[in-house]
Amino acid sequence: MGDNVERVGIDVGGAHLKVVDHNGVHIHYCPLWKGAPLKELLGNYSKETGSAAVVMSGELADCFSGKEEGINFIVDSVKAAFPDALFYGTDAAFHRDSVPQLAASNWLVSADYLRDLYPGAVFVDMGSTTTDIIPIGRFNQLKGLTDLDRLQQGYLVYSGLLRTSVPCLIRSVLLDGVPTPVSSEYFACSGDVHLVLGHINERQYTSDPPDGGKRDVGAALRRLARVVCADLNEIGEPGARAIAETFWAAQKDLIISGIEDVCRKAGTNEVIFAGIGSGLVAKKYGGTNLSGALGPVVDALPAFAVREVAERDSIS
């Protein structure tokens, strides 16, 4: 697609709004459960174009009583800015109004876009909150799957680069050789872990820290110390880093185990990676990081993919 294409691709998540247009990729921290200004943010893009292709996963945000309310809210918010917006569903079809199939459809549109380019691959998309593991070669069997279905089949790992609670994955850590249980409080998250370990920088830490505080290494180390009910001066930086390393080892093993399981079931060794955590996981597992082929849109692939699929299928 050339730069003259006017359609905007939009992915409305619970925590982030991702937009791809002719000016590039735009990622906004937009926590729906905190009343983020979704309509206003989208209105900034409707000034240049009246056309949008949309996917969502934010309907599960706990500010909504259920998925139907979430879908209606997102559709209404988008249509306030883009009255003629098209919404991609888990039936691999476009819709103009609220239907149940719109729930959690962003992963499928990425597979829809990639299936002609990598027909036999397993597609891994590590985002801020979750990691999708999708056997593209089974596209027709993927249609209609809910997130519950995907959790049960191993296609959705609920762990991501920024927003996963540390005690979600680890129960104890070795501090100076002493096994130490961790608190179940939401003191620190994966964003703190990956910042401390140098996997991301402060600019890439786009979500709110658990305490609402600073997104720098010093603050992240203090939050990690609280995981074992300590101040940083009690366990020192090495202790806080040990917590980070323990978490990353568990998260890496969880995701890689999931990839291996899906590859085994799909009968393939070809794995492709996208999402803000694509480089990190691809480095550990191997496979192809799509950032080389796709550039910056790899961090917002569903938003890019829904625009491309709408153009490919000549949807107007």
Image (cartoon, helix red, strand yellow):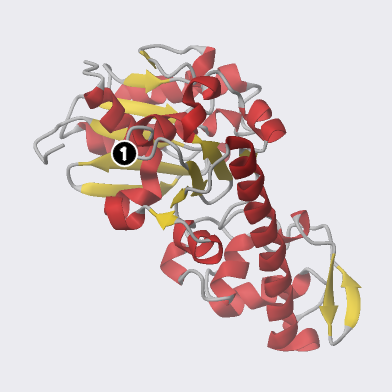
Name which residue type carries label 1: Phe
| Location of residue 214 by image quarter | bottom right
Q: Quadrant of the N terminus?
A: top left
Q: Name the residue tied to disc 1.
A: 304
Pick the residue in front: 293 or 227. 293
Q: Is there any visible trace of residue 204 in the rendered image? A: yes
Residue shown at the point (60%, 75%) measured from the top left = 219
| 247 sits left or right of 33 in the view | right
**Extreme-left residue of the structure:** 4
Q: Quadrant of the C terminus?
A: top left
| Horizontal and vertical percent position of residue 193 | 62, 69
Pick the residue in front: 296 or 218. 296
Vertical comparison of 201 with 151: above or below: below
Vertical comparison of 197 with 210: above or below: below
Pick the residue in front: 73 or 304. 304
User: What element does badge 1 sit on?
Assistant: helix
**Extreme-front residue of the structure:** 267
Q: Residues within 10 Å of mark 1 (few under 14, many from 20)?
A: many
| Location of residue 8 by image quarter | top left
| 170 sits left or right of 60 in the view | right
| 297 sits left or right of 134 in the view | left
Vertical comparison of 108 with 34: above or below: above
Residue shown at the point (53%, 36%) measured from the top left = 135
* Number of numbered markers: 1
Residue shown at the point (74%, 57%) measured from the top left = 186
| Horizontal and vertical percent position of residue 188 | 69, 64
Q: Is there any visible trace of residue 213 in the rendered image? A: no
Residue shown at the point (55%, 28%) measured from the top left = 59
| 94 sits left or right of 59 in the view | left
| Horizontal and vertical percent position of residue 15 | 52, 44
